[in-house]
Amino acid sequence: MSASENKPDSSSGGSMSRRSFLRVSAGATALTGLAALAAGLAPLRELSRFTSVEKFLQKHYHELSPEQMKRVLERIAREVEQQYDLRPHVRDLKPMDGVEFVYALNLSRCIGCRRCVHACVAENNQSGDPDLEYIRVVKMPKGTFDLTKGDHNYEPEEVPEDGYFYMPVQCHQCANPPCVKVCPVEATWQEADGITVIDYDWCIGCRYCQAACPYFARRFNFRKPRIPKERLNPDMSYLGNRPRESGVMEKCHFCIQRTRAGRYPACLEVCPTGARKFGNILDPDSEINYILKEKRVFTFILKEDQGTLPRFFYYLDK
């Protein structure tokens, strides 16, 4: 093990984080004999350097009692207030009974304006330095759905352009998510309403989920995210848009702080053409249910051969 691997996580101001502790410990278990024992115990000497013992000792999300979660939310609110001088409203919103969220996107109407991208960034407290965006809008030549032939860096001032269509790509909230299967610490999982979530306090930043995702939907914070105070959205969710640290994965979560409170995702609300549709597939009277039934001949799944069973569909007008 190199000397650099024994150093505390510099992203937390010289304090060791849970993920650096786990990385060092995991690396130590790969060694043998007394060297392994010594290396495995070495991180314990750094426990006093944690910024919050409470955070380090926090249980897995599924093991937290309501009272423990209340303390966790208070700690997060306190940390955000200390960093941004703004008191947030942090909640832990649970899935609603009888709800399974599904998204549908009308490619005939998308004009590639990227307003969805900017609304998502603002709503979900995504970093502006470095830039992290959950939604990619790809300019595609008509006649193909091969993303390798698309332009990911087109100029939005020039849209729509003849001979092309525009395909927004984000987390597909798969019913068979490969990202969940590869996580070694169960920091990501699928909720009852179909949303695949990430616990930022539990993620160790191994990036296995990023490699497993066929939609390139997961983002990794290589360095501490920066969000201007005036741009911070104070309406936060534990599994959603609360500020993240460096060294963790994040992604689209269907604006969990909005959708579980009965609102639409931010990307849908700003779409100027009505290309985005969202709702409860278990409700037979929902618009999303109607679209998937009436447009079934014109509906397709991106990378269907991967067997991920997405809850994100594309469709075309007749």
Image (spheres, helix red, strand yellow):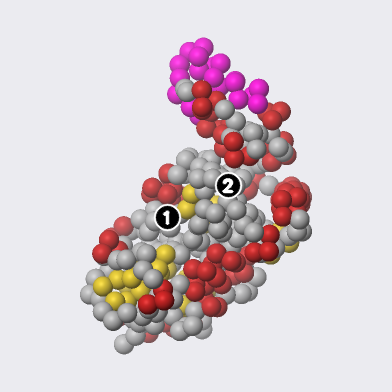
Visible residue check, residue 189: no
Sequence-first tag of 1 and 2 = 1
Residue 18 coordinates in the image, percent (x, y):
61, 37
Label 1, residues with CA under 10 Å away: few <14, some 14-19, many ≥20: many
Visible residue check, residue 261: yes
Label 2, residues with CA under 10 Å away: few <14, some 14-19, many ≥20: some
Residue extending furthest bottom?
Answer: 318
Closest to the observer: 228 or 142?
Answer: 228
Query: Which of the numbered marks, if any, corresponds to residue 9?
Result: none
Query: Residue at 51% of width from left, 81% of height from top?
Result: 286
Residue 254: in magenta span: no
Magenta stretch prevailing secondary structure: helix
The magenta region covers 26-46
Quarter occupied by the C terminus: bottom left
Which quadrant of the figure has residue 47? top right
Please name which of the two marks, 1 or 2, marks the residue nearer to the observer. Answer: 2
Query: Disc 1 on helix, strand or loop?
Result: loop
Query: Residue at 54% of width from left, 16% of height from top?
Result: 37
On screen, residue 289 versus residue 97, left or right, reads left
Query: Which of the numbered marks, if any, corresponds to residue 177?
Result: 1
Identify the residue position indicated by label 2 in the image.
Answer: 224
Residue 211 coordinates in the image, percent (x, y):
38, 47
Query: Residue at 49% of width from left, 68% of height from top?
Result: 117
Query: Disc 2 on helix, strand or loop?
Result: loop
Q: How many marks?
A: 2
Residue 24 coordinates in the image, percent (x, y):
53, 28
Query: Residue at 62% of width from left, 69% of height from top?
Result: 258
Q: Amino acid at mark 1?
A: Pro
Residue 29: in magenta span: yes
Which quadrant of the figure has residue 141? bottom left
